[in-house]
Amino acid sequence: MADWTTENAAELYGIGYWGEGYFSIEDGGDVVVHPEGSGGPGVNLRELVEEIRHRGLHTPLLIRFSDILASRIDHLVECFGAARREYSYAGQYLPVYPIKTNQQRQVVEELIDAGRRHNLGLEVGSKPELLIAMALLDTPDALIVCNGFKDRAYMETALLAQRLGRFPVIVLDRPDELPLLLKVSHELGISPHIGVRCRLATRGAGKWADSTGDRSKFGLTAAEIVEVVKLLRSEEMLGCLEMLHFHIGSQITEIRAHKEALREASRIYVGLHDLGCKLRFVDVGGGLGVDYVGSKTSLESSMNYTVQEYAFDVVAALQEACDERGVPHPDLVSESGRALVSHASVLIFDVLGVDGPIGRAAPQEPGASEHKVIRDLWEVWSAIESENAQESFHDALELKEESTTAFNLGYLDLAARARAEELFWSCCERILNLLPDLEHVPEELQGLEQQLSDTYYGNFSVFQSLPDSWALDQIFPIMPIQRLHQEPTRRGTFADLTCDCDGKIDRFIDMRGDSRVLPLHEPDGRPYYVGAFLVGAYQETLGELHNLFGDTDAVHVRVDATRRYSIEQVVEGDSVEEVLSYVQYDRRDLSERVRRAIETALYKGNITLEESALLRRRYEQGLSGYTYLD
Ligand SMILES: *Cc1c(COP(=O)(O)O)cnc(C)c1O
C-alpha cells in the first residue's frame, strides 16, 4: 500500500482503543507516551529508550511512568465523585490499593504520594504485605485493609499499628478468626476495627469466577456473619464491626457480574444494619477490569464497561438499598489494583533476528531429470488461483506426504526432499496471498497465516516479564514502537531467549477477536524495539527465573509540561551473579573451580596462556553482566 500512514498503523495495532489516551503515534512513526492522558505532554518512546540505553542500561527494559499512576488514581476518584454527585450519595469514596498487584517499593511509594490527597489506603493479604503497609503508609486516616490468613502475630502487629496512628481494618476471612482476634485485642487492650468478608452466592465472571460463590476459599456465609454479630454483641463489641467486605475476583469482564454482586452485598449491608450494626464502610474489593484488547467486549482480555459505569453501579446499588430502608449511606472503599497500575508500565525488548519460512522467492522450475513429485508440485504451484485455492492446498499436501514417503524408502535424496518442501511452502504462500480475495476462507486454510509466519527473536523472557501471557493466556497489546509510518509487510510471532517451547508470544489483539500473528516490519539493520503495553499489574512479581533470566532493568520516568522528562529512579536488573545466588551458587566458588580447571589445562598444554586469560576475562564478565543479551 503506497499511501500507508500512521493512522493505518494506529488502526492496525488498536492503540487508540486500548491506550486510554496515554499512547499515540507521531508523524515520524514513533510511539508517543502521554503520561497525563490524551492532550497532555508527550514523550517519544523510541528516543527515550535510546537515551536510557546511552546511560548504560539495557533492553529488555521496563519503563514505569509515574504520572500515569497518578492519573489513574485521579481518574478513579473522579469517576466516583461524579457518581456520588449523580446519586446524591452522602458517604465518602476511599480508594485502596491492593499491594499484591505490584509490590515494587517504588510503585507503592509513588501511589501513596500521588494518592495522598485522596486518602489512598492499602490492602494487604499477608504478613509481609502488612509490614510494608505499616512502614510506608503515613497518610493520616488512610485505611490498611487486612485480608488473608491471619495468625496471632499478624493480628498483634495490625492492632499495634493503631498506636502509630495507622487505621488497620482486620477483615475476618474465616469464622474462626474472631475468637483469636477478641483474645488478642483484650490482651493488648486495643479495640479493633473489624471487617467481615462475605461470601456472596453470586458468582463472578471471567477467569476468576471461582473466587466467589458458595465454595470459595474466603468469606463468611450469611449464617456465619449472623454468628459473628451475636458473639460481638455478647462481648459488647458490636461497635467494632465497621466494614462489610467482598471481592468477586479479578478482571471481571462483564458489568452484569458486578451489578449482581453489588445488589447482594447491599442487601447484606442493610440487613446488618437491621441487626443493629452501624457499619461505616462497604468495601467492594477489586475486579475492576482493564481492556487489554480495546474491544469493549466481555472477552477474557477485555471488559464491556468503563470505570465510570462501574462507579455509577457501585454508588447506585448502595444508594438504592439504603434509601429504600432509610439506612445511612456508608463510605465506599474499592480495592482496584489492576485498573490503577496496568497502564503505567511498558516493557521494551529488541528483536535479535528474524527467521522466515523457506521459499520466499519464487521457486525455480524443475528440470526434466528431477523427481516426478517435484515436477508435480511445480505444476500445482503454477496453477494456483483463487478459484482452486483449497483444491491446490490438498494437492500440495498430498504431494508433500508422497515426497516424505519416497524419501523414507530411499527413492528421493536429501537435496530433492528439500526441494519438495520448498515448493510445498511456496504453494502455501501463494494460497495465503489469495485468501483476502476469497469470500469465505475454508477452516483448514485459516491456520496458514500462522504456519507461514516469521519468528522474531526477542531479547526477553516471557516467564520473567510476561508470566500471565504464558500462564493465563492473557493477551497484552504488543507493537513496534518505531517505523509506524511504514507498512509492516511481514507477519510474525515472537520467540524469547529461553529454551522452552512455551517461551513465545503468538496471540495478539485484533479488533475481530485475537490473531495468531502480528504484522511487523522487515528488518533494516537498525535496532527494532517492540513494546508490550499495560503490563504494570501482576506481571512484575510473578516472574520466574526460567533459564536464569533475571529481573530486567527498570526506570521511572516523569514528564513535565514542557515535554521534558526526567528519570527519577533506576532499578538495575539482576546480574548473572545475583541470579545464580538465588539458586545457591556462590560466585567465588564457581570462579575458583574454573580457575583450577584452567590451571590443569595449562599444565597439560591443552590451552595457551592467551586463551586462558581470555576465558577468565569472559567468565568474570559473564558473572557480573546482565542476564539478557547486550
Ligand atoms: C487481588 C485482590 C484485589 C485486587 O483485584 P484487582 O482485580 O487487581 O483490582 C483486591 N482485593 C482482594 C481481596 C484481592 O485478593
Image (tube, rainbow, N blue to C red):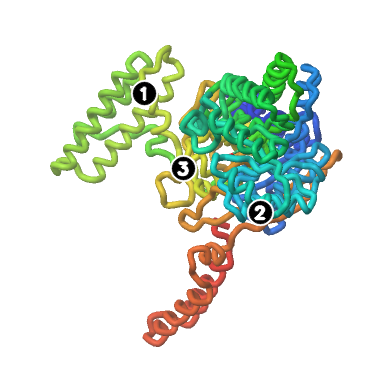
Q: Depth check: 415 or 125 in front?
A: 125
Indicate the secondary structure of the residue bearing disc 1: helix
Q: Residues within 10 Å of mark 2 (few under 14, many from 20)?
A: some
Q: Which mark is residue 504?
A: 3
Q: Residue furthest right?
A: 562
- Per the model, the C-alpha gap separating discs 3 and 1 is 23 Å
Q: Amino acid at mark 1?
A: Leu
Which circle's residue, 2 or 1, is located before the other in the chain?
2
> Residue, x 61% and y 43% (percent of image)?
147
Q: Amino acid at mark 2?
A: Glu
Kindly report which numbered mark, 3 or 2, lies closer to the viewer in this rendering.
Answer: 2
> Residue, x 49% and y 67% (percent of image)?
584
301 versus 317 height, above or below:
below
Q: Residues within 10 Å of mark 1 (few under 14, many from 20)?
A: some
Q: Depth check: 63 or 162 in front?
A: 162
The picture places residue 171, in percent across and down from the top left corner, at 63, 40
Which circle's residue, 3 or 1, is located before the other in the chain?
1
Q: Residue furthest front?
A: 234
- Per the model, the C-alpha gap separating discs 3 and 2 is 46 Å
Residue 442: quarter of image: top left
- Per the model, the C-alpha gap separating discs 2 and 1 is 64 Å
- Camera sees residue 251: no
Disc 2 within 8 angstroms of ligand 1 (CB)? no
267 versus 509 height, above or below:
above
**Which quadrant holds the C terminus?**
bottom right
The quadrant where ligand 1 appears is top right
Instruction: Report which residue position mark 1 lands on.
Output: 445
Instruction: Report which residue position mark 2 lands on.
Output: 156
Q: Residue furthest bottom?
A: 603
Q: Are marks 2 and 1 in contact (CB under 8 Å)?
A: no
Kindly report which numbered mark, 3 or 1, lies closer to the viewer in this rendering.
Answer: 3
